[in-house]
Amino acid sequence: MDLLAIPRTVTASALALGTALRGARVFHPRGDAYTGTAETDGGGRFGARVLDEAGRHDVVVRLSRGVGLPAPLPDIVGLAVRFEGRGRDGGPLDVLVNTAGGPPVLRHLFLPEPLGRTFSSVLPYRTGSGRLLLLGARDEGTGTSWELLAASLTGSWTRWGRLTLGPVLSGAVSEELRFRPTLGADDLQQVALFRAVRDQSYRESQALRP
């Protein structure tokens, strides 16, 4: 018996309806995409290659406002990073984080800027070694670079790399981007309880976007 069938269908249908009515993403409808570079420090023991191994990755980054309120109104800010070729079966690994609280309990709550100064995945990932982690980021104060972070559910944030923005991409390219954070990598997956609901929601919402 699939205990997630009803919540998965209800959530996905609600997001799909919202997308159809709005004619755009329900969440994070306004944003810009950029090229970028992620430099990973190496030496980590998280149990996921992208977090543990030193390297330099060309990435695609999207910065967006959660509800789509115009600045300077407060809004949840989303940071999406695509690591090409680092996901399952050689596909992309998409990591999405949003402004949230920094301390352990608040990491699971979306918070608008300026209240939320640390980005968090909010939902946990399971690595190849079985560890549960939250992924995060912290602005270095430039608006164009972030520390890439990871933490256990109750531990301190630990840096694993640095993200730097490159040139902005065209509006058409940004609009065509479809991030799928639920695909993950063989050694970095969102916890299954949440992944199934989120995956169907993303697919049905994106299918109805113009």
Image (cartoon, helix red, strand yellow):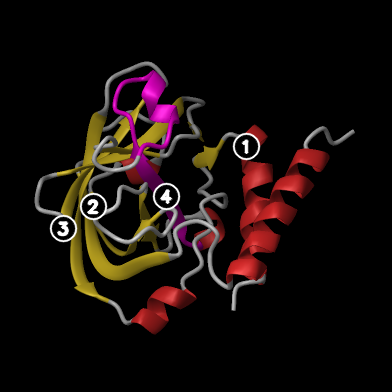
Give the farthest residue toward the left: 142
Region rendered in magenta: 91-111
Nearest to the eye among marks 1 and 2: give it. 1
Report which residue position mark 3 lands on: 144
Res 207 → quadrant? bottom right
On screen, 56 above or below 126? below
Res 72 → quadrant? bottom left
At a point 50% along the width and 48% down the height, the residue shown is 185
On screen, 96 above or below 5? below
Please indicate whether residue 144 sits to the left or right of residue 33 in the image. Answer: left
Res 157 → quadrant? top left
Query: Marks 4 and 3, Cα distance to the nearest angstrom?
Result: 17 Å
Query: Quick check: marks 1 and 2 in contact, CB under 8 Å?
Result: no
Depth check, front residue: 82 or 67: 67
At a point 32% along the width and 82% down the height, the residue shown is 170
Q: Position of residue 190 (x, y in %)?
A: 54, 39
Query: Quick check: marks 4 and 3 in contact, CB under 8 Å?
Result: no
Please indicate whether residue 43 sits to the left or right of residue 48 in the image. Answer: left
Nearest to the eye among marks 2 and 4: give it. 4
Instruction: Give residue 96's mark.
Output: 4
Report which residue position mark 1 lands on: 194
Nearest to the eye among marks 3 and 2: give it. 3
Query: Helix, strand or loop at disc 2?
Result: strand
Query: Marks 3 and 2, Cα distance to the nearest angstrom?
Result: 20 Å
Instruction: Give residue 55's mark.
Output: 2
Q: Mark 3 belongs to which amino acid?
A: Thr
Q: Which sits earlier in the primary sequence, circle 4 or circle 3?
A: 4
Please indicate whether residue 170 sits to the left or right of residue 84 in the image. Answer: left
